[in-house]
Amino acid sequence: MTDLFRDPVYDGATDPRVVIDSAGDWWMFYTQRRASLAEPGPGVAWVHGSRIGVAMSADGVAWEYAGTLEPTASGLLLEPGPPPADVDRTHWAPEVIWDGAQWRMHLTEIDGVPDRWQGHVREIVEYVSEDLRDWRRIAPLALSSDRVIDAAIAQTPDALWRLWYKDEAADSVTMVATSPDLRDWRVDGVAIGGNPHEGPDVFELGGFWWMLVDEWRGMGVHRSDDGIRWTRQGGPDDVILGSAPNGGHAHHGAHVRDGENVWFYYFGQADAEVHAPSGELRRSAVHRTRLAVEAGVLGLGESRNGGVPRGIRS
């Protein structure tokens, strides 16, 4: 299958979040990992030092690179072209929502360009925008620890806003916080426990609420009647998207609603050679599939190319 989108700068598009604006234009915000750099630094420095890449589309299928969100005195601004070669911070996993009056982004931020996973503060920071191009920084959120990443936000039937996120200081499970106004947040505890996972995405479809989480072997599925109490779909080893184009499996993605369709954009390994100095499969590509509910079970409809559906696997 042809990759849906590849980042033309570093070939490391991950954590895609797609939204559709009032004019019908599709926007993709993604972590721009520096996958193609021959010498990005030791360890996992190539996963850090990332900007938020932006791509645009008229139909959600054909995408054009638009640039990166570059830091300014007041926040972030979309600038065309590649980011600077030298950077001093890391941006990951943008969550972008329309709250009824403006756009909000909750972004994972890390100071510097760490070369290891441990020992570095990770915060979820709020931004607001009128046009998806110019973002004003509000503040980091006070959550359950200083090791929080991967925000997902939705308003549940009780009229409260909920923020789900990964807390690496709590065995990398999904925590949840609630707010009546998207300003004041209260941490409510663990939403999804069990084995470590990341990248929650929450949406309503087919009369139920659903949460997908990246288990590094496919997407675990959890169902709820109210967006508060969750039950796993299938057994502990059941996932969807356990296989993906170009081999491997799906990683951290997010949904977008287009009329009656709900599309899930995710990333996986690209149709590319290994990273020569390390031998790793660092390069990545974005794909999408349609989500569907049948008899209370979430599964996959057609891919962007009308491919064969993939359901639950053990």
Image (cartoon, rainbow, N blue to C red):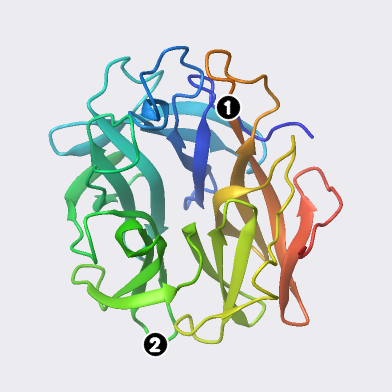
Amino acid type shown at disc 2:
Asp
Label 1: which residue?
283
What count of labels does the image hold?
2
Q: Which residue is found at the position 80% from the left and 57% from the top?
A: 310
Q: Amino acid at mark 1?
A: Arg
62 left or right of 81? right
| Residue 104 position in % (x across, y down) | 32, 55
In-front residue for pair 34/304: 34
Q: Picture coordinates of residue 66 (x, y %)?
A: 46, 28
Q: Which mark is residue 158?
A: 2
Image marks 2 and 1: residues in contact by CB distance under 8 Å:
no
Q: Categorize mark 1 by other alpha carbons within 10 Å: few (<14), some (14-19), many (20+).
A: many
Residue in the picture at 51% in, 27% down: 65
Q: Is residue 269 left or right of residue 51?
A: right
- Mark before the other along the chain sequence, 2 or 1: 2
- Relative horizontal placement of residue 80, taking residue 126 as reference (left or right): right
Quadrant for the C terminus in the image? bottom right
The one nearer the camera, 129 or 43, is 43
Residue 43 horizontal/vertical position (percent): 39, 27
